[in-house]
Image (tube, grey):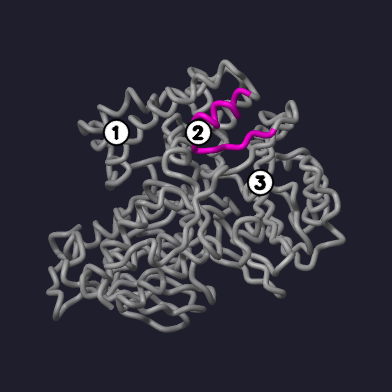
Amino acid sequence: MNATLPAPSLQRDRPRVAVIGAGPGGLAAALLLAARGARVVVFEKDGAVGGRTRTITAPGGYRFDLGPTFFLYPEILGSILAECGTRLEDEIALTRLDPQYRLWFEEGGIALDATPDLSRLEAEVAKLSPADAAGIRPFMAENRAKFERFRPILGRAFPGLLDFVKPDMLRSLPLMRPHLTVDADLRRRFRDPRVRLAFSFQTKYLGMSPFRCPSLFTILSFLEYEYGVFHPRGGCGAVSEAMARVAERLGVEFRLSTPVERIVFQGRRVVGIEAGGRLCRAEAAVMNADFAYAMPELVPERLRPRWTDRRIAEARYSCSTFMLYLGIEGAVPEAAHHTIVLAKDYLRNIGEIERGIIPEEPSFYLHNPAVTDPSMAPPGHSALYLLIPVPNLRGGADWEREAPRYREVAFRRLAALGIRDLEPRIRFEKTVTPADWRDRYGVGFGATFNLSHDLGQMMCFRPGNRFAGVEGLYLVGGGTHPGSGLPVIYEGARISAGLLCEDFGLPQRAPAAHAARLAAE
């Protein structure tokens, strides 16, 4: 693509970039592009920034994260903000959690507090299997090496098959073990299946099963223990709001409550977007909207032969989630800040979801942030967030009919933690079903974690950061390389912004004088 595009002067011909969606990927891309000299306008269909990473503010003073509830590996966002002339710690108050979360194993009725202190963690794991405690430090050392080896690969575009035979990729293969799943890889260190779950349930952040997810993703639990699990004061929505504030200081314009109807092309080249019934000129578009939901609407099928409507419909997608957001009078002492309940028959639970069956004895996750951050609920109250993995909409469930029944399943499952008296204390309640994820929040097939991260849908087999077949269209978010999860999405935005800057003759880093000027303000 790039030889035919003129290289603009930063003073006279700064490229106009339309960012579609103010989710974490769109915000990160807007920051980087504005810092490097582009004129950026962000179009967001909702009235607030953040996408799925935004805050639900409820009557009475309750605050809930809509989607992600913790912050992992802040180094990536920190480096993006540093390029923009500010510091992460100056914009966002982060609290490192210890314990990071509590795991409750119904098999045996044992709770494990996951702590980054490895000596204490060994004692916790010994509750489940004394022999497996000895595997923790070798696991950490091995995954430290894996992460260092694979980190540069995650940080670059992966446009084609030839990238698989680049030297750094070939050197990483022995550590990646692409022939193994996460669970199979962990078997080399841990014999007890509950211990393996303690180090593999994190594949749910990708909406996948540890029995199918590629072994590369053992690095997810490593990252938690090595770099920490953080709570942003005010919730993860506060991170999105801080990013938007910095972007505005850089000159980014936000047009909220302005849905984009289509991307406008002249031949194969982006020339603008149509939003809110108006045509807005732009030399490039960065699409942060959910790939499966938005691509068929925004880009004519003739311009995307590799990702036709049929291929999008037939791709493999993550599970969905059934959500309850509950404002509760009083404390909920049975729940830690983060609690994960792993069902007695976890393997059956996973299999049901994969077959499109709504589980009756599901695993679940409970967020109780007011124990750390009083701003999340009124004094003396709690703001609970309950997430249950369920099949995406390809399972065929009628969620208008299922939702009331499954609410009762959710409250019954809370009894596994000894929580039995919530309903009389509810002062606010909101439900989000897979159908709501699709219809209210624009998530294709209600697949909360986007395209699956199996080997056939990773790297060059995922929709490209520079979208193939057209000129001037770039993707950010969980639907492109490297994939889902906040730090990975930020990294993907850095890749896509770098490609756009390469194509339009912008610098690969913000000019030092610009960053210094912003820092001085």
Q: Residue at x 50, y 47 (%)?
A: 229
Q: Is 116 part of what is drawn in magenta?
A: yes
Query: Mark 3 — residue?
Result: 365
Query: Mark 2 — residue?
Result: 213
In the image, taking residue 504 as reference, residue 249 lies left or right, namely: right
Q: Going by the picture, which residue comes out furthest to the bottom?
A: 278
Residue type at mark 3? Tyr
> Which label was assigned to residue 37?
none
Query: Mark 1 — residue?
Result: 149
**Residue 152 percent coordinates (x, y):** 27, 41
Secondary structure at numbered mark 2: loop
Label 3 CA crowd tier, 10 Å (few <14, some 14–19, many 20+): some
Secondary structure at numbered mark 1: helix
**Residue 169 percent coordinates (x, y):** 27, 32
Of residues 189 and 167, the one drawn nearer to the viewer in this rendering: 189
Task: Tell me where residue 443 sits by quadrant.
Answer: bottom right
**Residue 101 seen in render:** yes
Q: Where the N terminus falls, by quadrant? A: bottom left
Of residues 142 and 347, the one drawn nearer to the viewer in this rendering: 142
How far is disc 2 from disc 1 in space, using C-alphas? Answer: 19 Å
How far is disc 3 from disc 2 in space, using C-alphas? Answer: 20 Å
Mark closer to the chain start, 2 or 1: 1
Secondary structure at numbered mark 3: strand
Q: Is 429 part of what is drawn in magenta?
A: no
